[in-house]
């Protein structure tokens, strides 16, 4: 597989970004091509991944964001959307897009990229925490309003706010391949699991570090058992909010047998 990652240039490539969004998410809240073009021309970064092994060199993934300002006044890059066609998932392409984004943002003189992800998505947690070395200290309730596209009942769109500090030693080590990736057993050795049962009251955050489990496949769980999905949502919300209020940071992730494990540490 020969993948080229570069800035989006032509009108047809911006249109392809729209088409890719529709393929991945079914056209829900698609960002228009003219908006992507305007973002790129005004300090934003719109990167595409092209499969050069195919004669047409089609767009198979993209990521974009724009210049932002944090609550402390610091300038940053706000990464808004990343998508990869289903056939190219689990190939490392999502991580490659993020590392390319990092290089472009560093070239702008910035040292922080932020974005959000669903706390119950193991795939996203694995990329953001384990592969990229990002952290989170902020839990946002229902940021986009309930999910109206859910066929089995609406869920609040809770999100972790990710902070990717581009010069942090954890990030640099991952960028050059020198950071060890912790196994589930190594993660479990660092602290207790607070929520062994999503339908029971969890233990309170305590100690230097602890684990919170999340579903291995939240999308499938929503299709099979919305009541269970809702229980996971509110349990993890309560734990994360309590942890952040006590000064913990979300710093790690590993996949266990049937769940994902989030690692929280004292900041």
Image (cartoon, rainbow, N blue to C red):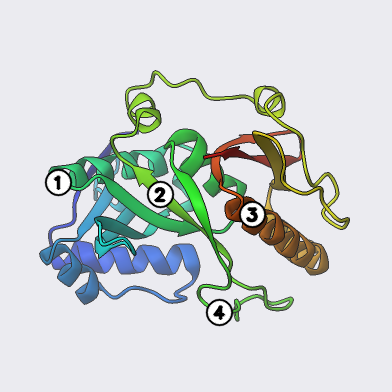
Q: Nearer the viewer, residue 74 or 140?
A: 74
Question: As drawn, is 72 to the left or to the right of 190?
Answer: left
In three-dimensional space, the C-alpha distance between marks 4 and 3, rounded to whole angstroms, equals 19 Å
Question: As drawn, is 113 to the left or to the right of 225?
Answer: left
**What secondary structure is marked by label 2?**
strand
Q: Name the residue under label 2.
A: 163
Q: Which of marks 4 and 3 is nearer the N terminus?
A: 4
Q: Earlier in the sequence, mark 1 or mark 4?
A: 1
In three-dimensional space, the C-alpha distance between marks 1 and 4, rounded to whole angstroms, equals 34 Å
Q: Neighbour class for label 2 at 10 Å: few (<14), some, many (≥20)?
A: some
Q: Quadrant of the N terminus?
A: top left
Q: Name the residue under label 3.
A: 240
Q: Residue 145 carries which label?
A: 4
Q: Which residue is drawn at 40% across and 57% down?
A: 115
Q: Earlier in the sequence, mark 4 or mark 2?
A: 4
Q: Nearer the viewer, residue 104 or 93?
A: 104
Q: Neighbour class for label 4 at 10 Å: few (<14), some, many (≥20)?
A: few
């Amino acid at each position: 597989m020969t993948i080229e990652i570069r800035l989006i240039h032509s009108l047809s490539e911006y249109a392809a970004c729209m088409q890719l969004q529709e393929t991945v998410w079914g056209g829900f809240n698609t960002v228009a091509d003219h908006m992507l073009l305007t973002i790129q021309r005004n300090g934003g970064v719109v990167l595409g991944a092209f499969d050069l092994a195919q004669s047409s060199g089609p767009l198979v993934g993209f990521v974009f964001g724009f210049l932002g300002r944090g609550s402390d006044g610091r300038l940053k890059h706000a990464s808004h959307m990343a998508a990869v066609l289903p056939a190219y998932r689990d190939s490392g392409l999502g991580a490659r897009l993020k590392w390319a984004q990092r290089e472009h943002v560093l070239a702008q003189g910035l040292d922080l990229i932020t974005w959000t992800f669903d706390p119950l998505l193991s795939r996203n947690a694995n990329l953001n925490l384990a592969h990229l070395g990002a952290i989170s200290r902020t839990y946002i309730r229902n940021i986009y309003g309930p999910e109206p596209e859910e066929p089995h009942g609406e869920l609040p769109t809770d999100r972790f706010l990710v902070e990717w500090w581009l010069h942090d030693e954890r990030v640099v080590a991952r960028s050059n391949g020198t950071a060890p990736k912790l196994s589930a057993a190594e993660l479990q050795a660092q602290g207790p699991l607070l929520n062994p049962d999503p339908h029971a009251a969890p233990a309170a955050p305590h100690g230097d570090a602890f684990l919170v489990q999340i579903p291995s496949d939240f999308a499938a769980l929503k299709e099979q058992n919305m009541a269970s999905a809702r229980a996971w949502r509110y349990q993890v919300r309560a734990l994360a909010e309590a942890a952040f209020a006590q000064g913990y940071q979300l710093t790690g992730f590993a996949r266990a047998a049937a769940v994902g494990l989030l690692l929280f540490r004292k900041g």
